[in-house]
Image: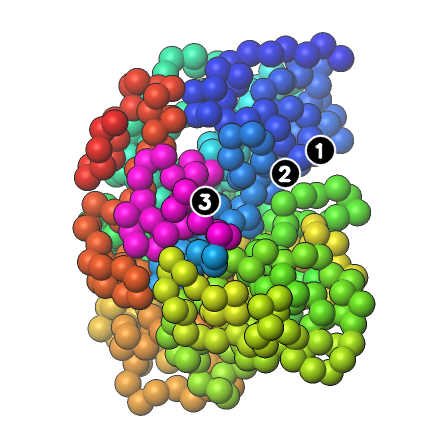
Amino acid sequence: MKIKITAAILLSMLFTVSCTNLNEDLYDKVEDGNFGNTPKEIDALVGGAYSSLRGFADGISNNYPTCEYVFFLNEVVSDEATIPTRGTNWYDGGQYQDAQKHTWKADNRMILSAWRYNYTGIAKINAIIYQIDKSSLTTQAKTPIYAELKALRAYYYYNLLDMFGNVPIVTNFEDLDLPSNSTRKQVYDFVEKELLDAIPYLNSNIVYSKLTKNVAYSILARLYLNSEAFIGTARWQDCLSMCQKVTGYTLTPDFFANFATENQTSTEIIFAIPYDSKAGTVGNYMSSMSCHYLHKLTLSPTGNYPWSANGMCAQPGVYSAFADTDKRKKCMVAGDQINLATGSVIIMDNGEPLTYTENLTSLADAKENEGIRLGKYEMKAGENWERDHDFVLIRYAEILMMQAECYVRLGSADLAKPFLQQITARAGEEMPATIDLNFIDQELLKEFTFEGRRRTDNIRFGTFFLPWWEKGATPKTRAIFPIPSSVLTTNKNLVQNPGYPVN
């Protein structure tokens, strides 16, 4: 089969994107018109677009969505999580401390990883669209394929809109010109149009882990929910309209079924990244990034569990925000950690007991046992480093919470109750007499702890700019991240985001 190497190589260089991508064909190489003409070949091409959601790692940066960079970036700049320095561990040039303090710079590797993750996915999709263009499929056959690919690309651009704002829009695989910034409003309009144009041709059924009508409606609902923060125009009613179009999902009776190893059976998950270590998927090791090095002994008397890195933990105040009766509180690991072989509390190398505490001495010098740990996804003895649970991107609880928030913001708090009652009833909690934005904000914190969305909520509610633990007031310009310095070096047509040094 003839291989043709073209414009995607230059695009990958432009955005400092690697060619490495799981077990799929290299995304900077595209087949000629002899490929992509049969259903099997089309499935392979489109499957490559979805595989990009799992990210990649190379010598430049670590770009797995569940790693300590891409996923954790939105967490540790929020009021939910932090990565404190513990002795000589987790300093890494101060990048995590800068994220916590909101003093990040354009050369922060976490920010570069988030940029590269999204633009790698976009470059892969642009290459696949090019391949479909060159295939012998009829226009009628190509239309739904284009819709699915463009909607998936819009998901990546939504992430860039949220995190970086004024980013280049690149859709033409053969265009070799170095792009300039689009305004945040232009990116917003692009995401909206791409999704609205795609929806008529997307699958109306529930298809797990695929870009269906329901997924597109959900992304549009997110776009409209955050519209005021993104472009200064509130669109609460439009958010409601999109949420009301999402059908076929229900909350799972067991909250933690969404995060079990076999969570693909959940009735609540709208969009997820599938993982299967036996099939060779890589990058899904988030569960090992939080707990202590000896935490494996709490899961297996023989320590038959992957090493843990003792990194991210909850900020002080998050764990205590949950009532003890709230079932969701078990999404965090707290207190004495018991060695299953001895029945006693694990003793750390310094001779002290391994007891996770909510208090943190300081961001720069935390003790090994300080901080409540991430425990939302199932952890069990015998697991591999590469976990098999699917990583949840959108679930039905978010659709319910968006509707509740919109009704409160529109002055109809009573209409929010039916949606909130489903959430609180599953958690084992009572509804308050008064439903206001503060309650919504706290409920979002508890429902979506460690799901990578807290920064966006903080910005929408305005709390992002207020002082909190180890952080002073934040300038409004830091609602978006800077364009990575290495990207600006590569492409002189790009302009740095306002509020950040040009060099």
Q: Nearer the viewer, residue 432 or 445?
A: 445
User: Label 2, on which residue?
Assistant: 51
Q: Earlier in the sequence, mark 1 or mark 2?
A: 1
Residue drawn at point x = 41 percent, y = 69 percent: 360
Circle 3 crowding by C-alpha within 10 Å: few under 14, some 14–19, many from 20: few
Q: Secondary structure at mark 2?
A: helix
Give the residue type at disc 1. Asn
Q: Secondary structure at mark 1?
A: loop
Circle 2 crowding by C-alpha within 10 Å: few under 14, some 14–19, many from 20: many
The answer to whether residue 75 shows anywhere in this view is no
Q: Is residue 474 left or right of residue 151?
A: left
Residue drawn at point x = 43 percent, y = 12 percent: 176
User: Label 1, on which residue?
Assistant: 23
Q: Which residues are magenta?
A: 88-115
Give the x, y percent position of residue 171.
Answer: 44, 25
Residue drawn at point x = 58 percent, y = 36 percent: 57
Q: Is residue 205 left or right of residue 153?
A: right
User: Label 3, on which residue?
Assistant: 92
Q: Main secondary structure of the magenta part?
A: helix
* Foreground disc of the pair 1, 2: 1
* Foreground disc of the pair 2, 3: 3
Pointers 1 and 2 in contact (C-beta within 8 Å): yes
